[in-house]
Structures are given as structure tokens and as C-alpha cells.
Amino acid sequence: MTSDEKARLAAEAADELKANQIVVLDVRGQTQIADFFVICSGTSDIHIRAIADRIIERMMENGVGKPRREGVEAAAWVLLDYGDVVVHIFDVEQREYYNLESFWSGARVLELTEEARGTAEPAGV
């Protein structure tokens, strides 16, 4: 599975649990950390953990191994690191504070289906 396909799959999985403001940034050529960042928001710590669990489940169903995980306990900013794709799941306050879309403003935004974009426009875009 290509990194593009992994990023889209993560976005679709987040959308299945009604994540908000789903954005996929193509950061190839801007960083060696990853090829894509998937950024989305949840409405509560329970919602954020559920989004993370769904993404992990869908990735594993499609042959992608388990990610390195950070922030699951606090669930204000959960990071799922798949190597070439890094998923950031924020609560609203942390998303506005860190504003990754603005920090990576030179990144190309992958077009997603309207359904997979979540409910509100992303901060800073």
C-alpha cells in the first residue's frame, strides 16, 4: 500500500467515526518525518480514542501494521505514527493552539471526498 493510500484510508476511517476537520497534507519534500500528515479533531477524549482505534483497526484490516502511539491516555493530542504517514487527532483547543495546517502551509492538501472531510472547515486553511 502506498503512503498516499494509507493517508486516504486513515482519513476515511476517521470520517467513519465523524471526526471533524479532516485534512491530509502531502509533506514530501518538506520533511523527512513522513510523506503525509492526516489531521483531524474529536469532540471529547472518548471520541478521540475511538477515532484512533478505528484508524488502527482499518489499517490492520488492510495489511498495515500497528503504529507507534503517543498521547492516548490524555487524548488531547493523539499521534499515530505509521512511518510514512503520521495521524494527528486533536481536541479542538489543542488543534487551534498548535495549528499544524499553518505550520505546514507549503504542503499540498490532498483532495478528499466531501464525506471524508469532516464537518467544519479546518483551522487556518
Image (cartoon, rainbow, N blue to C red):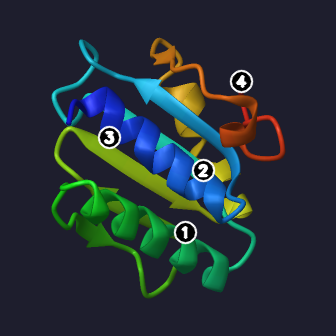
- Nearer mark to the viewer, of 2 and 1: 1
Report if the CB atoms under discs 4 and 2 are less than 8 Å apart.
no
Residue type at numbered disc 2: Cys
Q: Is residue 35 above or below residue 120?
A: above
- Nearer mark to the viewer, of 3 and 2: 3
- Nearer mark to the viewer, of 4 and 1: 1
The numbered dot on residue 125 is 4
Which of the two discs, 4 and 2, labels the residue nearer the N terminus?
A: 2
Mark 1 secondary-structure assignment: helix
The numbered dot on residue 6 is 3
Q: In x, y percent, where is residue 50?
A: 55, 78
Report if the CB atoms under discs 2 and 1 are less than 8 Å apart.
yes
- Neighbor class of circle 3 (other Cα within 10 Å; few <14, some 14-19, many 20+) is many
Near-viewer residue (120 or 123): 120
Q: Which quarter of the figure is the C terminus placed in? A: top right
The numbered dot on residue 40 is 2
Query: What distance separates the C-alpha of mark 3 from that of mark 2?
Result: 15 Å
Q: Is residue 95 above or below residue 65?
A: above
Which of the two discs, 2 and 1, labels the residue nearer the N terminus?
A: 2
Q: Which quarter of the figure is the N terminus placed in? A: top left
The numbered dot on residue 95 is none
Which of the two discs, 4 and 3, labels the residue nearer the N terminus?
A: 3
Which of the two discs, 4 and 1, labels the residue nearer the N terminus?
A: 1
Residue type at numbered disc 3: Lys
Locate residue 69 relative to residue 9 in the image: left or right.
Answer: left
Mark 4 secondary-structure assignment: loop
Residue type at numbered disc 4: Val
Near-viewer residue (84 or 98): 84
